[in-house]
Image (cartoon, rainbow, N blue to C red):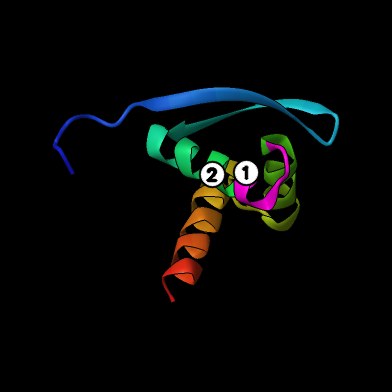
């Protein structure tokens, strides 16, 4: 890490017909967009999938965990 502060970025998306905003650190947005591109789906569609599987977890936290799981799977 460079020691520089990591900027939190807020985006608004429509998930399951409802507008929601998600705050994530910029590196997570980069990875989330890459994941959606890799799967050839929209960012909103990917977030909707994560939202549907998150149970009672906070959506931003569920996104971070999903990205961590993806990176771990790629590393194996």
Can you give x and y, in whole percent of width and height, for residue 36 in the image? Answer: 63, 45
Span colored in magenta: 36-42
The residue labelled by disc 1 is 37
Find numbered disc 1 in the image and state the secondary structure of the residue it sits on. Answer: helix
Q: Would you place residue 12 above or below residue 41 in this image?
A: above
Q: Nearer the viewer, residue 50 or 58?
A: 50
Which residue lies at the image location 61% right of the left edge and 50% below the top edge? 38
* Among the 4 quarters of the image, the one containing residue 28: top left
The residue labelled by disc 2 is 34
Which residue lies at the image location 67% right of the left edge and 52% below the top edge? 39
Which residue lies at the image location 40% right of the left edge and 35% below the top edge? 25
Q: Would you place residue 54 above or below residue 31 in this image?
A: below
Left or right of 76 on screen, residue 49: right
Q: Nearer the viewer, residue 16 or 35?
A: 35
Q: Would you place residue 22 above or below residue 41 in this image?
A: above
Can you give x and y, in whole percent of width and height, for residue 57 in the image? Answer: 60, 52
Left or right of 34 on screen, residue 21: right
Quadrant of the rendering where the C terminus is positioned: bottom left
Marks 2 and 1: CB-CB under 8 Å? yes
């Amino acid at each position: 890490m460079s020691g520089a502060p990591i900027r939190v970025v807020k985006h608004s998306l429509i998930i399951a017909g409802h507008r929601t905003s998600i705050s994530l650190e910029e590196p997570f947005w980069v990875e989330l967009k890459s994941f959606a591109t890799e799967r050839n789906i929209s960012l909103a569609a990917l977030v909707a999938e994560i939202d549907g599987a998150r149970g009672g977890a906070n959506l931003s936290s569920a996104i971070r965990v999903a990205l961590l799981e993806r990176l771990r799977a790629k590393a194996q």
